[in-house]
Image (cartoon, rainbow, N blue to C red):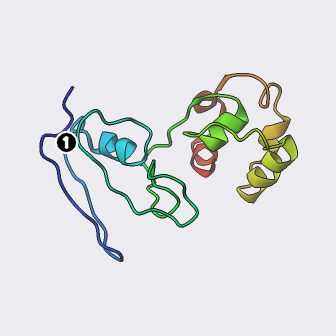
Amino acid sequence: TLLVDGLSFDVRWGSSLLLTGHNGAGKSSIFRCMGGLWPIKKGSIYRPISPSSASNVGLTGVVYYLPQRPYNALGTLAEQFCYPDAPPASLTDGQLRRWLDFADLGHLADMPGALTDELDWEFILSRGEQQRL
């Protein structure tokens, strides 16, 4: 399905961009593609690259976007925390808890199955917790 035909824009440092349109027009879909959550089949998306980034996938730590509604993936707490990347093998439960504590979410690591089971976080977390995660 074609999302947008011939879309082209750039946002210069210090500038902002407001996308508007009716419900279902594809505004959120554009940002999901920009963020690397959805692959694009044709065309290109060019993003700034962080010096610490090895690739140009996603927004690479230089640009972030905050959707109007959080996106939650099915999976363990570590998978949700690291999405869209897989959790690094070196990530320990203690390290995950420390990172969650920064967002006042350390208590989530104590939930039964949070570290081992595939859970639907959209139904478990409040909207505020989803945004912080």
From the viewer's perspective, tell me whether residue 32 is left or right of residue 111: left
Percent position of residue 19, x then y: 24, 54
Image point (81%, 32%), residue name: 111
Q: Is residue 36 above or below residue 124?
A: below
In the displayed orientation, state which residue is furthest to the bottom: 14
Q: Quadrant of residue 38?
A: top left
Image point (29%, 72%), residue name: 12
Q: As shown in the figure, which amino acid type bears the numbered disc 1?
A: His
Q: Quadrant of residue 2?
A: top left
From the viewer's perspective, tell me whether residue 52 is left or right of residue 57: right
**Which element is circle 1 on?**
loop
Q: Is residue 59 above or below residue 79?
A: below
Q: Which residue is disc 1 drawn over?
A: 22
How dense is the environment of label 1, judged by Cα within 10 Å: few (below 14), some, or many (20 and up)? few
Q: Nearer the viewer, residue 95 or 121?
A: 95
Q: Nearer the viewer, residue 28 or 35?
A: 35
Image point (28%, 67%), residue name: 11
